[in-house]
């Protein structure tokens, strides 16, 4: 008869590797059935991961063993006792010291001998290895899931977890058709400044009948206030997924955003102390990135400002100013609306009427025809000269092969002739390239002054910068005013275009005068325009 006293220790956690393990009651029941004759002095249960040391119930088991209250441990498997190096070492040390006289497992046989202890160490080390490997695999999988734009856990309220129809192994996030619009309505109510969070909660639950999605063991309940606060402070609703351990870094979500970044920021202002400002999100402001301070040369940056009125309304402003990374007295800020007006006026001063664009393109086409004839004549002359030079070099080689000239003379004349041939070849290439550059430059300039204003308004930062720099160089900001140094060939256009456009519109819309007079007047305007 075994007179040893045992502690029955049953453990289970929610880790992925242990989800298939028996439940705690099932472990205890099966162990009692398998070892009916042993003396169990205590049954201790714990719902905690063994991947890290510090389990309080397991510590109690070891204390009872060391205090002589028990002689052995009864558990389902060695990995129930330890999945980390420290606890594994404590167990094997207690066995060698004689504190633990026996271990019994439901799915493993332990022999208290040097070989048995070594096998036990191997078994627990294997459990530790699988736990560590699982942790790495899970982290890698979660990282890839975030990079793909998906959440790594249960979907936010207003969304649902689903499977990718093209890849059933991949989990994705989709809009919850029954609740997405309701959650968005909650955001709208908060952003209006007329509803507090408790008011929104009451309306959603009592008037709309909002209930959480029904799952196997949860759901079907009203929205709680804490959940609503968490919802309104969750930046993931903007379509950004925070990267764990990297403050201010985000992955772009693949699911549809419910609110804009501006709406999220406004919500945090409304929530006050209970809000959660976003951390260092790199935001693309409309005009940041291509303006510089006229005084110090530093770039011009932008920032959001919010003002909450007494009636709950939140006003949003965007201000631009010098970054002042160098000593600078240019401290005046300018609101984005003002800046937009200045840029629009600047672009308008260069924007031509569609008729002017048509005239310019016709003129370029005509100029291209005459330029092509001139270029052809130049190219013919260049090719003829180049051919003569090559023939001269061939004759020089022939004379050297017949020893009609000395080697030193041949080398000197050959070097000079080859240099001339190289220069002429470069001239031929330059003639062709200059023609292409000339045509391309003219077309680009006409395109910018015809359509740049519209494209600037709709384009991204890169497009805005390209359009502005096509008109001039060194766009600066000083004292709240934008300045641009226009290219030389655009200065006459900038100075004379407003009056010429006004004159054209007056002639075009005038009802007085004959058709011949109107045609002559328009022809005069065309001549002025093309004369620039």
Image (cartoon, rainbow, N blue to C red):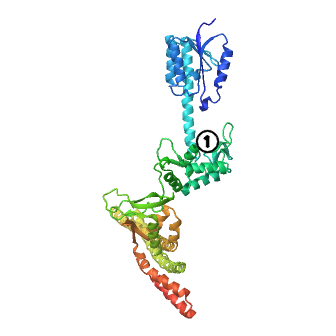
- Rendered view: 252 above or below 298: above
- Label 1 Cα neighbours within 10 Å, binned few <14 / some 14-19 / many ≥20: few
Looking at the image, residue 414 sits to the left or right of residue 69; the answer is left
Q: Position of residue 184 (x, y in %)?
A: 61, 53
Q: Position of residue 301 (x, y in %)?
A: 41, 59
Asked where in the image residue 220 lies, by quadrant, the reply is top right
- Rendered view: 508 above or below 92: below
Q: Position of residue 84 (x, y in %)?
A: 52, 25
- Rendered view: 195 above or below 479: above
- Rendered view: 382 above or below 291: below
456 or 520: nearer the viewer = 456
Residue 257: tell me if it is visible: no
Residue at the image point whose x is 61% and y is 32% from the top: 16
From the image, tell me which residue sits under label 1: 154
Asked where in the image residue 415 lies, by quadrant, the reply is bottom left
453 or 520: nearer the viewer = 453
Q: Position of residue 520 (x, y in %)?
A: 52, 91
């Amino acid at each position: 008869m075994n007179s040893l006293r045992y502690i029955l220790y049953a453990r289970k956690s929610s880790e992925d590797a242990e989800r298939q393990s028996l439940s705690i009651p099932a472990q205890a029941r099966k162990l009692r059935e398998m070892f009916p004759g042993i003396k169990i002095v205590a049954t201790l249960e714990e719902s905690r991961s063994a991947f890290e040391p510090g389990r309080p119930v397991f510590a109690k088991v070891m204390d009872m063993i060391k205090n002589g209250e028990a002689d052995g441990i009864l558990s389902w498997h060695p990995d129930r006792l330890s999945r980390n190096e420290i606890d594994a070492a404590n167990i094997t040390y207690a066995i060698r010291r004689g504190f633990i006289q026996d271990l019994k497992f439901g799915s493993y046989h332990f022999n208290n001998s040097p070989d048995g202890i070594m096998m036990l160490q191997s078994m627990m080390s294997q459990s530790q290895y699988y736990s560590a490997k699982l942790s790495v695999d899970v982290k890698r999988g979660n990282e890839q899931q975030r990079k793909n734009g998906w959440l790594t856990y249960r979907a936010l309220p207003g969304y649902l977890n689903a499977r990718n129809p093209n890849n059933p192994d991949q989990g994705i996030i989709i809009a919850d058709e029954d609740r997405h619009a309701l959650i968005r309505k909650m955001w709208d109510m908060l952003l209006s400044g007329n509803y507090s969070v408790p008011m929104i909660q009451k309306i959603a639950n009592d008037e709309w009948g909002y209930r959480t999605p029904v799952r196997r063991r949860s759901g079907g309940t009203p929205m709680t206030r804490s959940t609503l606060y968490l919802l309104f402070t969750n930046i993931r609703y903007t379509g950004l997924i925070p990267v764990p351990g990297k403050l201010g870094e985000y992955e772009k979500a693949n699911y549809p955003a419910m609110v804009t970044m501006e709406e999220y920021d406004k919500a945090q202002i409304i929530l006050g102390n209970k809000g959660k400002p976003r951390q260092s999100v790199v935001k693309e402001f409309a005009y940041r990135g291509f303006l510089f301070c006229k005084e110090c040369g530093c770039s011009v940056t932008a920032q959001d400002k919010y003002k909450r009125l007494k009636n709950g309304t939140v006003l949003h402003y965007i201000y631009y100013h010098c970054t002042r990374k160098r000593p600078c007295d240019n401290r005046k800020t300018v609101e984005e609306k003002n800046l937009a007006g200045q840029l629009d006026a600047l672009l308008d001063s260069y924007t031509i009427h569609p008729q002017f664009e048509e005239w310019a393109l016709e003129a370029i086409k005509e100029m291209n025809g005459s330029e092509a004839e001139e270029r052809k004549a130049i190219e013919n002359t260049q090719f003829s000269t180049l051919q003569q030079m090559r023939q001269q070099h061939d004759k020089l080689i022939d004379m050297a092969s017949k020893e009609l000239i000395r080697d030193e003379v041949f080398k000197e004349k050959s070097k000079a002739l080859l240099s001339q041939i190289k220069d002429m070849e470069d001239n031929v290439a330059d003639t062709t390239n200059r023609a292409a550059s000339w045509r391309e430059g003219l077309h680009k300039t006409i395109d910018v002054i015809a359509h740049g204003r519209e494209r600037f308004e709709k384009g991204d930062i890169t497009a805005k910068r390209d359009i502005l720099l096509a008109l001039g160089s060194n766009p600066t900001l000083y004292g709240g005013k934008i300045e641009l140094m226009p290219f030389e060939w655009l200065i006459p256009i900038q100075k004379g275009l407003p009056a010429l456009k006004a004159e054209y519109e007056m002639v075009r819309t005038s009802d007085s005068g004959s058709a011949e007079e109107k045609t002559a007047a328009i022809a005069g305007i065309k001549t002025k325009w093309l004369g620039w």
